[in-house]
Amino acid sequence: MAKNKRSAGVSILIIIFLFSLCSLLLGSIWAYDQVSTVVFNRFGDPTSELSFPQKIKLSLELYIKGDSLFYEPKISTDEVFFQVENGQSIYDISEQLRAAGYIQSVDSFINYLIYRGYDRRIQSGKFVITDGMNGIDIARKLINPIPEKIYFVVLPGWRAEEIADALVYSGLSFTPDDFLRVVRYPTQSMLPEGFPELTSLEGYLAPGEYYLDREITISEFIRALTQRFAENINGDLKTAIAEKGLTFSDAVILASIVERESIIEEEMPIIASVFLNRYEIGMKLDSDPTAQYAVGYNEKQDTWWTNPLSLDDLNFDSVFNTYIYSGLPPHPICNPSLQAIQAVAYAADTPYFYFRAKCDSSGKHEFARSYEEHLLNGCE
């Protein structure tokens, strides 16, 4: 009898335990349903790539701490730019946003990215952040595969056709042919105020990094490059050029030659002195890059700068080829860096008339006073 009573007691305890377990489970399901409903209404649907435990964890985190995502930073200007580098981790991006004051909590921002599946969709590029945007707005901005700003680079020594080639895949709204047409036949209205009249914009398209509106017009694009050029040129530089007995346009032409002839920046003022010395006595400049510019695109080498030059190339009949014609080319042969223009303005005072590459593949040059000395500098 006692044994039966004990068995009945155990059964009752089991039933109570199972009932409590079911109640706890049902309560948990109800609580999660309530939490997930609130989180869904505030933050949207979770990505289907999450496991159920991940959904529970992230939903609870956002339910408890997600208020920080609605913080709206005060931005003093109309807009600021935020850069995401290729391969940058979501933690680094989030910490960068927090340090800039655009979000309050790194953990909440990361939780939201993972919850929505945005952590795998963030794009590299430069994004615009405006006043009134909160963390959710910023997260959505970062997954836009078409950033508002186009990153575009003009390398020192590029000729206009190389800039045009880079435009093909830039995402900008005008064509390379449109660009080259303007470069070759510029109108004064496209140039910065006070800019001289030019027959070509070659040489005046400042190298550097640009962040441009995707819908920028060809006129605005040209003005951005020429304005950068104008901003780089101060009064002291113009005075130094005038003291050399050069017009400013002559100095830019010489700088374009120095740019293409130089590999080591420190040598630019010495190389500039060589061409100035030749120019002052009426000696032909005999510059390989001018022949390269004249010859143009080399299909076999897939370059605008044929190397090495053949005898036919050196004898190519063009007013740009300084092996054939004395004096300066009609306009610059490339778009020189500010350093190359400064090298002409502040050229070293040397007796050199010749130079050639050193034989050690260092990129440096041997300089000579006479042609005989120049020959002795040749490689054995």
Image (cartoon, helix red, strand yellow):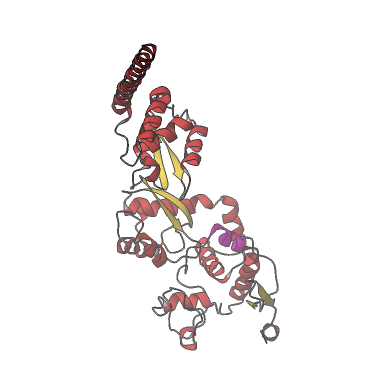
Q: Position of residue 256 (x, y in %)?
A: 52, 66
Choose between 153 and 20: the one closer to the eye: 20
Choose between 185 and 25: the one closer to the eye: 25
Q: Quadrant of residue 134?
A: top left
Relative to 277, residue 173 above or below:
above
Q: Position of residue 276 (x, y in %)?
A: 61, 70
Q: Position of residue 272 (x, y in %)?
A: 61, 68
| In this rendering, position of residue 128 left or right of residue 335 | left
> Which residue is rendered at x = 67% and y = 76% of the image?
360
Relative to 314, residue 351 above or below:
above
State the extent of the magenta-drawn residues as a range.
Answer: 334-348
Relative to 181, residue 73 above or below:
above
Check residue 97 for magenta coloring.
Answer: no
| Residue 179, visible in the rendered structure | yes
Check residue 341 for magenta coloring.
Answer: yes
Which corner quadrant holds the N terminus? top left
Which corner quadrant holds the C terminus? bottom right
| In this rendering, position of residue 327 left or right of residue 370 | left
Q: Quadrant of residue 81?
A: top left
> Which residue is rendered at x = 34% and y = 37% of the image?
116
| In this rendering, position of residue 112 left or right of residue 349 | left
Choose between 280 and 375: the one closer to the eye: 375
> Which residue is rendered at x = 53% and y = 69% of the image?
260
- Residue furthest to the front in view is 1
| Residue 133, visible in the rendered structure | no
Q: Position of residue 48 (x, y in %)?
A: 30, 40
Relative to 284, residue 31 above or below:
above
> Which residue is rendered at x = 39% and y = 26% of the image?
60
Q: Quadrant of residue 379?
A: bottom right
